[in-house]
Amino acid sequence: MEIPDYPNISEWAVPFYIVTMLVELGIGWFTGRVRYETRDTLASLVMGGGSLLAGALTAGAIGTVSLWLYEHRLFTFGFEPWWIVLAFVLDDLRYYWVHRFGHEIRWLWAAHIVHHSSQHYNLSTALRQTWTSFFALWWVVRLPLVFLGLHPAVLAFCGGINLVYQYWIHTEAIRRFPPWFEAIMNTPSHHRVHHATNPRYLDANYAGTFIVWDRLFGTFVPEDDAEPCRYGIVKSLGTFNPLRIALHEWVGIARDATGLSLRQRLGYLIGPPGWSHDGSRKTSADLKREHLRRHPEEAGKPGRPEVA
Amino acid sequence: MDKTTFLLAFVIGGVGLVTLATVLLGWGRRVPLSGLQEAQDRLAIDLPDATVTGGIVADDGLAALLDLDDGRVAAVACLGDRRWTRILTGAGGPRIRGVQVSDEGLRIPLRDPGAPILRVALADADTRAHWAARLEA
């Protein structure tokens, strides 16, 4: 069986990234709906370049493990277009779950927090990517699909398309698409919610390409025009230093997990972000509960817990 | 030119072009706090239950120190055109690594990998001494 030579979508997309960022800058200048900040943008782009480099350095190891597992696959799917479509849908489902884990498990969050660390939301934010996803083991969640019988090259191709799709939704220049599109696809509106730190928007809209996964698994929260998104992370960064952006959460984990019992250490490693052994910090669920305590009239609305 | 070199040149050129465009559009300037009220409002987003009893905005507007009713001191600082906040003193152990005082103001190293330094420009010596004492208490 001959393996097609799939293009590296991420590399092909680089000119598209640059042109569209310049267009978005122009839109921002003329309409005021988009905002860039020089050092924030530079930090995001440096993180993106570093992520490309980290990906190139670790691709061999991931490829080796994946190809070994593929040799022991359960089924054999071909390279025909319909299998590519199936692979894309399954890989998008895989993305939903690993992305969700990335917000709910601190070890994975330590890598993913980079992408959320800008207080801006523009196309450069899309490129603010982690350098440590290999170390955080994000790639492991794709292995079940390989074991199922989807070739690693097909999955890499689908993953590339998925990432490029997610690029253009990082913008405030586009408000809403027609309802049918918003119902099926991940859009700028849905993804703005995902990047927001407003309590009601926390831990929502994990989708890559298809928002249907969030609707299916109960994590969908629509954007409410009455509550504008505040972007970033709950504990905003006070630096543009790329090394600190890349590593600050890992340093935080190391400090938190020192000198404690095994159970407490595990809590800091695999508990949700904000978990602490002495209850001195707040998880997303805590923040939602506290918000609801202050605003009981909002109980039951999307993104809010049912009871305080 | 091989593909890797071309891609590298494109990435570096693109980063430079986009960054330059933000500078030319005037989006490279720091945006200082408009006053104490803005600092209070920003803190209220991160710490909605905190009650501010007083405070001071740095001479350059790039940071503010806020007294809370429970005795803690909080900071609001500028990062480009955005703000970040931290509790500097109080429960949970030391959050600062001391306070360095100079003629320009206070330099406060933080025990925080995501926000390593807080600078507060304070020209008035008495004001500097007051806040240095509050932070080191």
Image: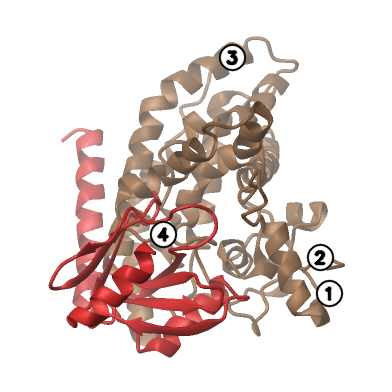
Chain colours: A brown, B red
Q: In the displayed structure, does residue B11 sit left or right of residue A99?
A: left
Q: Which residue is mark 3?
A: A1
**Distance of label 4 from label 3 (alpha carbons):** 50 Å
Quadrant position of the C terminus of chain A in the picture: bottom right
Mark 3: give few (<14), some (14-19) or many (20+) Cα within 10 Å.
few
Asked if one can make out residue A20 in the rendered structure from this viewpoint, the answer is no
* Marks 1 and 4 belong to one chain: yes
Residue type for callout 1: Ala
Q: What is the C-alpha distance between the residues marked 1 and 4?
A: 31 Å
Q: What subunit carries mark 1?
A: A
Q: Against A162, is A38 above or below?
A: below
Mark 1 vs 4, N-terminal side:
4
- Tell me, for residue A305, which label it has, or none: 2
Q: Which mark is residue A237?
A: 4
Q: Chain of mark 2?
A: A
Q: Are marks 1 and 2 in contact (CB under 8 Å)?
A: yes
Q: Is residue A14 above or below residue A227?
A: above
Where is residue A82 shown, x and y percent of the image? 69, 36
Q: Residue at x 32, y 62 (%)?
A: A41
The circle on residue B80 is: none
Q: Residue at x 69, y 25 (%)?
A: A144
Q: Tag 3: residue type?
A: Met
Whether residues under marks 4 and 2 lie with C-beta atoms below 8 angstroms apart, the answer is: no
CA separation in Å, label 2 and label 3: 51 Å
Q: Nearer the viewer, mark 4 or mark 3?
A: 4
Quarter location, residue B115: bottom left
Q: Earlier in the sequence, mark 4 or mark 2?
A: 4
Observer-nearest of B132 and A122 = B132
Q: Indicate whether A145 appears above or below B79.
A: above
Q: Amino acid at mark 4?
A: Leu
Q: Chain of mark 4?
A: A
Counting residues from the start of the chain, the first of labels 1 and 3 encountered is 3
